[in-house]
């Protein structure tokens, strides 16, 4: 079924009355006024903000930036956890005619330096003193950053630095500037067109350096209007905003799609309170990466261990009934009346309580994306009565390219192409995408852009197939980029190459695809480690006993720790094991040049690899 074009892909996406993100936002500020747009919990109390209020705040921030010298087409960078100020700064910079580059709050100072320099960010917005410290460490390497704006000044009241000001101070500047430049934001919005750069999202590249994917206003609006057309809409529109806003998924779904669909953004207090906040917010559509769906499921299984035998029996019976009913839906068949009755009872007596416990008793739709998910996990949520839609896409296609339609999902598939998007399978088995959502290219990397954009088609790097109903499936990756269960793209060769700088490591294989964290199998350098052990009078009789020695394991642990400090938290190796067999070029898992073969290592050492994830289960 190669070279197959989908009929669904030609569905027309309705034309929107606006052609840039700021025009969309200000259209709804005018239309919705006092309706509440977002809220955030502060000191235990939810603080709400209307469209009009957010409009005023973003006008002040935008005017403040302009008063400092911000020009159309320039870039700001935001280094912060997901919060209301992130969205304010984003909308303000876009309204001032600029573009926005988001940086993961877990990124190291060295990564912040690279991302600011590559994007040529002229203003840097940071969340607090912790993020500000990263800038202070590298400020000499960032001459183009004119000012740093801090959201939360707690602990910084005595700071006296001409390059650093609070968000409140920036807003004050903006208010003063607006007195004599009332229409400046309106003028700046008018200076932008649909084809201008709006958003920069950095993705890990196989060469090691992150690549800045350039998304235009047209790309973003195509993506959001498509979701509006494809996903069902409810009267009660509550969203939980907690995934990183520098990631394309939360930026599109949590921010811009929320504005377009008139859904209220609810910002969690902090990353640790996500699950408590979900129970409070009771979202109607919940978008999350697989790791969150897995954690919600785990919370139920852990709670069950404390339950009485009767409660455990009732739960198992109810889930079995739910799965029986949803198996008919999975095959697109009507559920027989007697099973429907049993399902109604199971929900009334048990399953609704489970949904309430995880905060999803009002959720009619769950959307999962950014990394592969277990089909059985989808079926568990379906059994609870939550419609689960797996969405597939990538930064380079501005979010989603395919999705399972509500009511006709196929667990294990990535669904059908979204309206306005074409997907096909090349002769090599690679999934190709053509859509108004396909990005402008990689910033400063024309060669890399030319590699993935060929004749209007985006080469995704995913190997896949399509079934007779037009549903697509991912079967492999063209390259070895790891996508963790949290949706983070990681290039293992970067970590592996750093590890191989150690005199005690011959080779290493980083594991983490669809996993909660990275782990690593290490092949020690026999000669150097033997010498190290002899100098310290550490007893060993052969290679295996050397690799099993606590001191040697600690030594390699220290080497891994050194490498970890150069990477963001999500990119760090959390567990490792030493390969205890002395391998030669004759062994099947080794190349002639003594490099470990990733695929064979994953197969041959499957049990050893699993041992590194048991504590996370």
Image (tube, grey):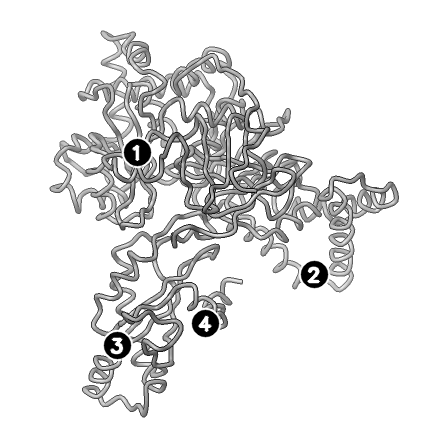
Whole-percent x, y for residue 510 in the image: 37, 62
Give the crowd class for mark 3: few <14, some 14-19, many >=20 residues within 10 Å.
some
Residue corresponding to mark 3: 525
Q: Quadrant of the C terminus?
A: bottom right
Which numbered mark, 2 or 3, is in the foreground of this view?
3
Whole-percent x, y for residue 134 in the image: 23, 45
Q: Residue furthest right?
A: 338
27 and 65: which one is in front?
A: 27
Residue corresponding to mark 2: 307
315 and 340: which one is in front?
A: 340
Residue located 45% across and 15% down the image: 29
Residue 238 vertical position relative to residue 269 in the rendered view, above or below? above
Pointer 4 or 2: first along the chain: 2
Measured Cα–Cα span from mark 3 to mark 4: 19 Å
Left or right, 135 with reference to 32: left
Residue located 60% across and 48% down the image: 412
Q: Which of the numbered marks, if any, corresponds to residue 101? A: 1
């Amino acid at each position: 079924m190669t070279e197959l074009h989908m009929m669904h892909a030609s569905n027309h996406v309705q034309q929107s009355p606006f052609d840039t993100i700021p025009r969309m936002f200000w259209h709804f500020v005018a239309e919705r006024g006092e309706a509440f747009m977002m809220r955030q919990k502060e000191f235990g109390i939810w603080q709400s903000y209307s469209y009009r209020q957010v409009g005023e705040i973003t006008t002040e921030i935008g005017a403040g930036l302009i008063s400092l010298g911000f020009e159309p087409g320039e870039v700001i960078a935001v280094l912060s956890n997901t919060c209301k100020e992130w969205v304010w700064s984003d909308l303000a910079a876009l309204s001032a005619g600029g573009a926005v580059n988001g940086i993961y709050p877990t990124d190291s100072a060295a990564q912040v330096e690279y991302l600011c320099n590559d994007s040529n960010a002229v203003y840097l917005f940071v969340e607090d003193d912790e993020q500000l410290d990263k800038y202070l460490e590298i400020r000499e390497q960032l001459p183009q950053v004119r000012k740093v704006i801090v959201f939360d000044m707690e602990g910084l009241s005595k700071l006296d630095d001409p390059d650093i000001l609070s968000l409140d101070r920036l807003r004050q500047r903006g208010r003063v500037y607006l007195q004599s430049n009332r229409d400046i934001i309106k003028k700046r919005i008018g200076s932008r067109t649909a084809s201008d750069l709006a958003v920069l999202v950095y993705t890990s590249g196989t060469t090691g350096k992150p690549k800045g994917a350039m998304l235009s206003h047209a790309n973003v609006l195509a993506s959001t209007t498509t979701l509006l057309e494809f996903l069902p809409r409810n009267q009660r529109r509550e969203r939980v905003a907690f995934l990183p806003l520098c990631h394309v998924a939360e930026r599109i779904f949590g921010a811009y799609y929320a504005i377009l669909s008139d859904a209220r953004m609810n910002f969690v207090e902090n990353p640790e309170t996500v699950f408590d906040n979900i129970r409070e917010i009771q979202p109607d559509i919940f978008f999350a990466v697989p790791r969150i769906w897995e954690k919600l499921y785990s919370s139920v299984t852990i709670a069950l261990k404390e339950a009485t035998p009767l409660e455990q029996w009732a739960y198992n019976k109810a889930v079995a009934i739910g799965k029986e009913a949803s198996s008919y839906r999975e095959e697109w068949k009507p559920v027989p009346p007697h099973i429907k009755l049993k399902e109604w009872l199971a929900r009334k007596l048990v399953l609704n309580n489970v949904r309430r416990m995880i905060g999803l008793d009002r959720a009619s739709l769950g959307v999962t994306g950014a990394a592969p998910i277990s089909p059985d996990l989808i079926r568990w949520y379906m059994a609870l009565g939550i419609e689960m839609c797996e969405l597939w896409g990538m930064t380079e296609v501005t979010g989603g390219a395919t999705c399972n339609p509500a009511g006709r999902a196929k667990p294990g598939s990535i669904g059908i192409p979204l309206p306005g998007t074409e997907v096909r399978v090349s002769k090599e088995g690679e999934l190709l995408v053509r859509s108004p959502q396909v990005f402008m290219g990689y910033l400063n990397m024309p060669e890399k852009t030319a590699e993935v954009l060929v004749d209007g088609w985006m080469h995704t790097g995913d190997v896949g197939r399509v079934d007779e109903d037009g549903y697509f499936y991912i079967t492999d990756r063209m390259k070895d980029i790891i996508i963790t269960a949290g949706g983070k793209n990681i290039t293992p060769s970067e970590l592996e190459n750093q590890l191989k700088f150690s005199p005690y490591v011959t080779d290493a294989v980083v594991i983490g695809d669809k996993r909660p964290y990275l782990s690593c199998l290490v092949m020690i350098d026999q000669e150097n480690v033997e010498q190290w052990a002899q100098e310290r009078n550490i007893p060993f009789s052969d290679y295996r006993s050397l690799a099993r020695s606590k001191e040697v394991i600690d030594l390699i642990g220290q080497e891994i720790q050194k490498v970890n400090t150069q990477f963001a938290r999500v990119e760090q190796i959390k567990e490792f094991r030493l390969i205890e067999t002395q391998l030669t070029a004759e062994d099947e898992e080794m190349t002639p040049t003594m490099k470990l073969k990733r695929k064979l290592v994953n197969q041959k050492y499957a049990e050893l690899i699993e041992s590194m994830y048991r504590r996370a289960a």
